[in-house]
Image (spheres, grey):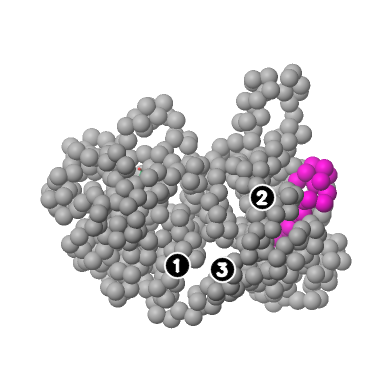
Amino acid sequence: MQKPKGEIRNKRRTYIFVVGGVMSGVGKGIATASIGALLKSRGLKVTAVKIDPYLNVDSGTLNPIEHGEVFVTKDGLETDQDLGNYERFLDEDLTRSNYMTTGAVYSSVINRERTLGYGGKTVEAVPHIPLEVISRIEKAAELTDADLTLVEIGGTVGEYQNVLYLEACRMMRLKNPKDVLVVLVSYLPVPGSLGEMKSKPTQYAVRTLNGTGLQPDLLICRATHPIDQIRKEKLSINCNVQPEDVIAAPDVPTIYEVPVRFRNEKVSQRIIEKLGLKVHPSDVTKWKKLSEQVQKQEKPVRIGIVGKYFSTGDFTLSDAYLSVIEALKHAAWHIKRKPELVWLNSEDIERNPATLKTITKDLDGILIPGGFGTRGIEGKLMAIKYVREQKIPYFGICYGMQLAMVETARNLIGWKDANTTEIDAKTTHPVIHLMNEQEEKMKDKSYGGSMRLGEFPCVLTKGSQAQKLYRVKQILERHRHRYEANPQYKVEFEKSGMYVSGTSPDGHLAEIIERPDHPFFVACQFHPEFLSRPFRPHPLFLGFLQAAAKHR
Ligand code: GLN
């Protein structure tokens, strides 16, 4: 074991803006998180802020198919999946100050204007919006006392919507030219018809960025292949950056190798030279080990995920379940297995329940993650019944717990119309019902940011499987739901073999349920996936994966 090196405080606030060029979805979040991890390994105090350029005030009201997972911070803000990337790579808990949307920024400015906060001045998009953005970025840095704050601007340069954020960057840089850097994460396509890596789209992206008054300090060149010396020089000349500031960022077998690659490309070296920061030598040992560990595994563990937020047009996306996927991977690697994830569309199961037998044949475990609404629910219930009867390990998260209770109520207790009132408000057996405090909110249609959100304590039942896995008496987990188990039916559930193994400290809310008659049938009302870290897999995921590996 290497001796951990202490922090080196620079008593200066520095900032790196990360912007995207050419196209989205090329891993800007992972690049940002990896730069953060590298600089943290050098002893700096690092934090990261994500800016989303849409008008939604938070990500809570967005359809996951459109925007991917909603990540919840411990203080209960519904944010973008990149906050999850930052938490996993930085191994730090972030808060609501690490996230903003255009909707949130405009709301603050307009509210301030309504309360005469601008003292009668004309309030304008420029400079008042960028000033609000800057004050939020500075606040995030203050609150975490960060030497270095990474600021990722969502979208790509040239989009109308993120111009005011580039303006905020320009204004910050104008004020403190020595403290602010700009990194452009671009994409270099290799068109099949040419078989050659093309740099022109990146050149255009840099020109567009130049048009906003910004010059990139570093160009991160995402591509299927590493960028070669000829193209590095070409980009250097045409984009006005040094050749050593053109960074190769080819596709890698695991995202956890990115910090290692960036170190090899001297990314953090270039950054600290430009910002003039005092640091330790870089240390990527743990990332290197993890990446080797990931690639070494041959023995598979196959987990089926039953969900519905998969498809956009002809394409299948798994972004809606990003943290669940990462948490499964962390746990699988920890027990030296190669995770194989199989996507099971609950609507397909619903249409053709007979397929359950064949699709689960090679699966070692089934997970049902969080969800909302009616679509695909019966398919999920069929899957739960099947794995319960066949004794296939089951892990339910949030909706996955609520539906496990509905399934038991219908098929074991015998209440045929049992349901959650989210689906059937008139059921005679509302085993899952709206939480007390939610009634009023639903009447007023105040859907935004109004669920039970963020970290809450949960007391574990002595001797339960959950308690054995956590090995503590009380835990803190993050929530995002409006409905809960109806305590009225506790006795009947216990008679059917399902019991509550974790509750809120007042004993009122059921937070974990399990079935002792099953190899692994555990479900929780919270979202454990948000707490899993690559070097610290989550106990419940670990228990599930161990059971799955055993089932195989
Ligand atoms: N729809 C359910 C609720 O609101 C479950 C939410 C979830 O799975 N995140 O309680």
Residue type beneath disc 2: Ala
Task: Tell me whether the residue at label 1 lies in contact with that at label 2, contact meaning CB atoms closer than 8 angstroms.
Answer: no
Q: Residues within 10 Å of mark 2 (few under 14, many from 20)?
A: many
Q: CA distance from mark 1 to mark 3?
A: 11 Å
State which region is magenta. Answer: 169-187
| Residue matched to label 1 | 329
Q: CA distance from mark 3 to mark 2?
A: 23 Å
Q: Which mark is residue 146?
A: 2
* Labels 1, 2: front one: 2
**Residue 106 in sight here:** yes
**Residue 188 in sight here:** no
Whether disc 2's CB lies below 8 Å from ligand 1 is answered no
Estimate the x, y position of residue 388 in percent, counting from the top left.
Answer: 22, 61
Residue type beneath disc 1: Lys
Based on the picture, tell me whether residue 543 belongs to the magenta stretch: no
Identified at 67% across, 75% down, the residue is 225
- Quadrant in which ligand 1 is drawn: top left
